[in-house]
């Protein structure tokens, strides 16, 4: 059974939110690739659309859009996802994962494409904080 940590980015506010998904919600991500858009129901955003922007496996290897399938591949990188050079002209051979999501992926990064007020939809907006403060005061 697949289980993922999904990091949801809201480009309108610059905030990110994390959700754990498993079961049927996790199965919606299996077989999808970087760049695919899906309904936000799987992460608790029923009125939104999200786009898969990347991810990593359990060992921290990043997914790259230019590697097909789910396989691991060693690439000689100069820059980009998986390697940031510390000096001019530096290159390094890095193991990366393909762009398709499978059971080996541990984290999926998504960005909200369509919809309003992501924080409120996830229950983490100012109203949710005010309700939590009021509940704490009652105790």
Image (spheres, grey):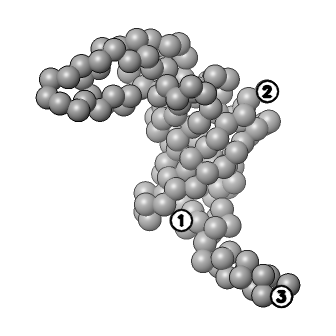
Badge nearest the viewer, 2 or 1: 2
Q: Quadrant of residue 14?
A: bottom left
From the viewer's side, name the closer residue of 69 and 17: 17
In the picture as drawn, the residue positioned furthest to the left comes out as 88
Q: Position of residue 17 (x, y in %)?
A: 58, 55
In the picture as drawn, the residue positioned furthest to the front comes out as 86
Q: Quadrant of residue 118?
A: bottom right
Tell me the element at label 2. loop
Find the distance from the CA under tag 3 to the CA under tag 2.
Answer: 41 Å
Q: Please name the residue shown 48% across and 60% down the image.
A: 15
Find the distance from the CA under tag 1 to the CA under tag 3.
Answer: 31 Å
Q: Quadrant of the C terminus?
A: bottom right
Q: Position of residue 75 (x, y in %)?
A: 35, 14
Q: Is residue 76 left or right of residue 9?
A: left
Tell me the element at label 3. helix
Q: Is residue 33 visible?
A: no
Q: Is residue 26 left or right of residue 138?
A: left
**Relative height, residue 110 to residue 28 (above, below):** below
Q: Is residue 33 left or right of residue 30?
A: left
Find the distance from the CA under tag 2 to the CA under tag 1.
Answer: 32 Å
Dot 1 crowding, Cα within 10 Å, few <14, some 14–19, many 20+: few
Badge nearest the viewer, 1 or 3: 3
| Residue hosting label 1 | 116
From the viewer's side, name the closer residue of 36 and 133: 133
| Residue hosting label 3 | 138
Numbered badge on residue 1: 2
């Amino acid at each position: 059974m697949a289980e993922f940590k999904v990091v949801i980015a809201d480009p309108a506010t610059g905030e990110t939110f994390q959700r754990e998904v498993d079961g049927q919600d996790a199965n919606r991500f299996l077989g999808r690739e970087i760049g695919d858009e899906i309904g936000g129901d799987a992460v608790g955003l029923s009125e939104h659309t999200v786009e898969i922007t990347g991810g990593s496996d359990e060992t921290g290897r990043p997914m790259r859009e230019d590697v097909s399938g789910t396989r691991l591949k060693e690439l000689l990188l100069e820059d980009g996802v998986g390697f940031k050079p510390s000096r001019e002209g530096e290159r390094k051979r890095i193991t990366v994962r393909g762009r398709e999501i499978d059971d080996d992926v541990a984290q999926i990064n998504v960005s909200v494409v369509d919809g309003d007020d992501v924080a409120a939809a996830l229950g983490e907006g100012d109203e949710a904080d005010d309700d939590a403060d009021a509940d704490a005061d009652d105790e």
